[in-house]
Structures are given as C-alpha cells and as structure tokens.
Image (cartoon, rainbow, N blue to C red):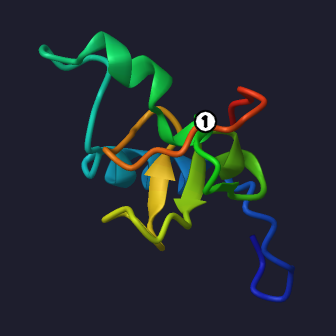
Amino acid sequence: MAADEPWTGDDQDHNDGCHARWQASLNRSTAQSGYRDEWYDAQCGGCLFWIALSGQLGQDYGACSNPGSSFDGRVRFEHDGCENVAGRADGSFG
C-alpha cells in the first residue's frame, strides 16, 4: 500500500498479522479443554455491546463497549467472551 493511499483495512498480510497477535489475548477459546457449553451462547459477537470493526478484520473482530466488562474499549475476537455478555434481544450475532 502506498503512503498516499487511504487505509482500507483490507491488507491481507496486515490482517493475518493482527489475527495472530490478537489470538494470544483470548479470554476463552472453543478449542481449549474445559470450554463450558454455556459459553457458546455468551460470545462477544452476540453481545449487545459488540461493535464490529470495518473491512476484513470486522468479519471476526470488534470493539467491546460494555462498561461492565474488563474488556471495555478493547478489540476482541467474536467467539471470545466474558462474564458480562449482554445478549441481544433478537439473538443476532456478529
């Protein structure tokens, strides 16, 4: 990407690097042993306070805006979760 071009957020190498770095900060992973069944319904992407990023990263990542969460103001993976998930009334995700 040239320095004079507007940033679109759709640079695959950059996004792959972000994904690799950000995966290290997961609170919960569906791949971990001990992942509880009830956590499937308490993932960030289904939270009322989830704000998806734009571009390709927004397909998997968003910002937490839940004032009751320790992740407030931080980028989170949509399948991560916390104890303060506020489910959406319509049950939508992402």
Where's residue 58, x and y in %?
Answer: 69, 49
Q: Tell whether 10 sits left or right of 30.
A: right
State the image coordinates of residue 18 (x, y, percent, origin top left): 46, 55
Residue 8 sits in quarter? bottom right
**Dot 1 amino acid type:** Gly
Q: Residue 63 at what x, y percent from top left?
A: 56, 62
Does residue 66 lie above or below 3 as drawn? above
SS for callout 1: helix
Q: Position of residue 39 (x, y in %)?
A: 36, 24
Q: Which residue is mark 1?
A: 46
Please identify the quadrant where the N terminus is shown.
bottom right
The quadrant of the rendering that contains the C terminus is top right
CA neighbours of label 1 inside 10 A, class few (<14), some (14 to 19), many (20+): many
Name the side, left or right, on which 76 lies relative to 53.
Answer: left
Q: For the point 78% across and 78% down, which residue is it?
A: 2
Out of 57 and 91, give the one closest to the viewer.
Answer: 91
Q: Determine whether 59 is above or below 42 in the image.
A: below
- Tally of numbered discs: 1
Instruction: Name, please, the residue furthest toward the bottom.
Output: 4
* Residue drawn at the location 34% of the way across and 45% of the way down: 82
Q: Residue at x 85, y 79 (%)?
A: 6
Towards the viewer: 5 or 30:
30
Is 55 displayed left or right of 13 in the figure? right
In the image, 50 versus 21, the foreground residue is: 50
- Return the residue found at the far right: 5
